[in-house]
Amino acid sequence: MGVVMGTPLELEDPEVIGKELTDADLPWVVIVWNDPINLMSYVAFVFQKLFGYSKEKANRLMRDVHEKGRAVVATGTRTEAERDVNRLHSYGLWATMEHDK
C-alpha cells in the first residue's frame, strides 16, 4: 500500500487567528444589575457568601448596583465568569458577563 497524498489544507490568515486568540484571552467581567425584587441586604449577603468579600466590600458593590444600576463583582476566564453568573442566578440575582474592555 502506498501513501495517499491529499491536497494541502489552507490555513486562515495567521494575523486573524492571533487576534482571535488574543480576544479570547481577554478577561471577562461579571456584572450584577439592579432589580426591583432583591433587598439590598440580601445582595450584599450573596456577594459575601459567593465571593468571600468583606462586609465593607460587599456593601460597596451593593450600593453601586443600587445607585449606578450595575457593578462588576468578579473577573476571570470565560469559564469562571460563566460559573459565577450561574451561581448568582441560583441566588436570584440578575447577572451577565462580558469581555473586559
Image (cartoon, rainbow, N blue to C red):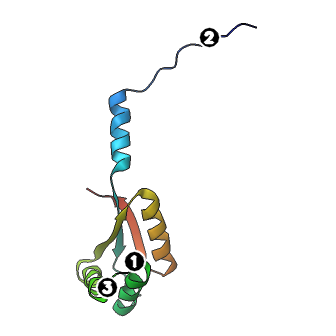
* Residue at 34% across, 75% down: 33
Q: Is residue 4 left or right of residue 38?
A: right
* Residue at 32% across, 30% down: 15
Front residue of 51 and 72? 51
Disc 3 marks which amino acid?
Ser
Question: SS class of the residue under badge 3?
Answer: loop
Q: Is residue 23 left or right of residue 84?
A: left
Disc 2 marks which amino acid?
Met
State which quarter of the image contains the C terminus: bottom left
Front residue of 63 and 67? 63
Disc 1 marks which amino acid?
Phe
Q: Residue 30, how many percent across, how many down?
A: 36, 67
Q: Earlier in the sequence, mark 2 or mark 3?
A: 2
Residue 68 sits in which quadrant?
Answer: bottom left
Instruction: Look at mark 2 in the image and give the residue it sits on.
Output: 5
Q: Residue 66, how many percent across, how many down?
A: 28, 84
The reply to whether dot 2 and dot 3 touch (C-beta < 8 Å) is no
Q: Residue 75, how many percent across, how many down?
A: 34, 64
Measure the alpha-carbon separation of dots 2 and 3.
Answer: 63 Å
With respect to residue 75, does 27 lie above or below? above
Q: Residues within 10 Å of mark 1 (few under 14, many from 20)?
A: few
State which quarter of the image contains the N terminus: top right
Q: Earlier in the sequence, mark 1 or mark 2?
A: 2
Instruction: Look at mark 1 in the image and give the residue it sits on.
Output: 51
Q: Residue 100, how many percent across, how many down?
A: 29, 58
Instruction: Look at mark 3 in the image and give the residue it sits on.
Output: 54
